[in-house]
């Protein structure tokens, strides 16, 4: 009568070593070093192999419930309390409430597993990610210009920490203007923009993040210019729009400006 034995990789390795001992290709001392066991443990494996064959090397604990396993009644009681009172809680906070208010103690990872299996909790990886429609590039050169800045030790120890202001064409990805400044401030952005306009002319719009230079939080529905910063008012007088990225995904596109600027500097 034939039957199938399921063995782990560790148990298969032990079987191979034990068979080599019986074939006199390894000594017990050598086998103990290979398996990381004592000689007495290797002798016990030899006895189990001689008695039961390969099945003697399979762990007897396999398929048996852990001695520390909670009963189904205990598990269901904890989950019922979470459904009734803490449905919006994560495993960590739910565990604290179970201990504090109900005198029920469960390991955090155990409770996380229970809540996941019951459909009460899902990990961040399993949560459905929002899908963002990528913003298409403009068709014409100079139509939209991305601007961004980064405060960094650009000159290492050879100079002070400063900001790199970068202007890049949205349609072609061409780097159009760079300026080092003490910080991302209105004065230096105005000077950099003036230099850009003198060299490349007027775009339809600038595309930026929501830095305070570009966006004000105090706006009025009646007066279009009331919510503009000084930089925004200057662009308004020139009939140039300022478009601020609304999501981190869109912000990544403006951050590409700084990366290209860094590559050109280095």
Image: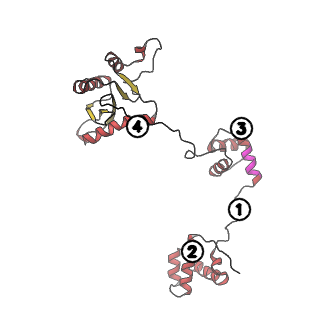
Q: Residues within 10 Å of mark 3 (few under 14, many from 20)?
A: few
- 164 vs 124, left or right, is left
Label 4 sits on residue: 252
Quadrant the C terminus occupies: top left
Q: Which residues are magenta?
A: 73-80
The residue furthest right is 73
The residue furthest front is 139
- Of mark 4 and mark 1, the one earlier in the sequence is 1
Query: Any mark on residue 85, and which?
Result: 3
- Of mark 4 and mark 2, the one earlier in the sequence is 2
Q: Which of the 4 quarters of the picture holds residue 65?
A: bottom right
Q: Residues within 10 Å of mark 1 (few under 14, many from 20)?
A: few
Q: Whole-Å distance between the Cαs marked 4 and 1?
A: 51 Å
- Of mark 2 and mark 1, the one earlier in the sequence is 2
Closer mark to the observer between disc 4 and disc 3: 4
Label 1 sits on residue: 67
């Amino acid at each position: 009568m034939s039957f199938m034995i399921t063995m782990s990789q560790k148990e298969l390795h032990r079987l191979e070593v034990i068979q080599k001992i019986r074939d006199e290709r390894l000594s017990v001392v050598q086998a103990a070093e290979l398996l990381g066991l004592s000689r007495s443990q290797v002798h016990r494996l030899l006895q189990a192999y001689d008695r039961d064959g390969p099945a003697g090397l399979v762990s007897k604990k396999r398929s048996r419930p852990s001695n520390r396993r909670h009963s189904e009644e205990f598990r269901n009681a904890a989950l019922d309390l979470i459904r009734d009172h803490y449905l919006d809680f994560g495993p960590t906070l739910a565990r604290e409430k179970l201990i504090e208010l109900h005198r029920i103690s469960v390991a955090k990872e155990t409770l996380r597993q229970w809540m996941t299996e019951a459909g009460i909790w899902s990990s961040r990886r399993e949560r459905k990610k929002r899908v963002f429609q990528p913003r298409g590039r403009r068709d014409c050169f100079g139509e939209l210009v991305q601007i961004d800045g980064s405060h960094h030790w650009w000159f290492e120890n050879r100079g002070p920490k400063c900001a790199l202001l970068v202007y890049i064409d949205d349609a072609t990805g061409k780097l159009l203007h760079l300026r080092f400044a003490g910080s991302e401030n209105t004065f230096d952005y105005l000077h950099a923009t003036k230099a850009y306009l003198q060299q490349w002319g007027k775009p339809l719009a600038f595309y930026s993040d929501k830095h305070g230079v570009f966006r004000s939080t105090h706006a009025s529905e009646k007066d279009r210019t009331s919510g503009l910063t000084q930089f925004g008012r200057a662009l308004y007088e020139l009939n140039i729009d300022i478009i601020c990225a609304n999501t981190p995904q869109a912000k990544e596109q403006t951050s590409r400006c700084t990366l290209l600027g860094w590559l050109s500097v280095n």
